[in-house]
Image (cartoon, rainbow, N blue to C red):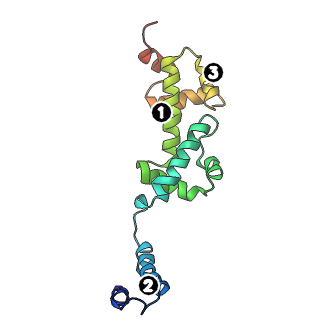
Amino acid sequence: MLDQLRAGYARPPGAVSQEILQLLLATPLLHIDRLPGQDEAGDPRFGGEIYARFRSELERSYATTRRAEDYSPHLGYTVKPLTRACPAATGRPVKQVIDARVALEAQRLLAHTDTPVAVIARRLGFSEPTNFGTFSTRHTGSPPGDFRRAHQGPQ
């Protein structure tokens, strides 16, 4: 293909049409684009555009859902590209990315507000404070009240 391209450009001007030269150039580029084993992390759609759109949607919706399936319709993708984009961008599965965002907000609210734990739980989309307590313990290493005592400044 490259030999044909080289030969086409070596001909005198006007001997080969512009369209032929463009097609000769497009052919190897299309083949390169379809090479097997291409790393999805290098593809701007993976770890790039999809992940950036997901992060924006996550900021809007982390308090209402922690399921990847609930994010994908808002992004215009199925769950599959989303489950590829998160590891490509962060090295972590989508569920861990979502939970980490919820845990970060929980830690912020516990450490910097006096909002009751039950209210924080509801604000972050937990149906029961006990579910929030289990989530918090799993992600911070301590129950919400203990985390608050350890991280709140002097009153």
| Mark in front: 2 vs 1 | 2
Residue drawn at x 58%, y 48% as measured from the top left: 68
* Secondary element at tag 2: helix
Give residue 61's position: percent from left, percent from top.
Answer: 62, 38
Pick the residue in front: 60 or 17: 17
Q: Tell me the amino acid under the disc marked 2.
A: Leu
Say whether disc 2 or disc 1 marks the residue closer to the N-terminus.
Answer: 2
* Secondary element at tag 3: helix
Give residue 21's position: percent from left, percent from top.
Answer: 44, 84
Residue ID for mark 3:
119
Pick the residue in front: 75 or 107: 75
In this picture, residue 17 sits left or right of residue 6: right
Residue ID for mark 2:
21
Q: Quadrant of residue 41?
A: bottom left
Residue ID for mark 1:
138
Q: Tell me the amino acid under the disc marked 3.
A: Val
Between the C-alphas of marks 1 and 3, the distance is: 19 Å
Q: Is residue 55 above or below residue 8?
A: above
Pick the residue in front: 143 or 74: 74
How many tags in the picture?
3
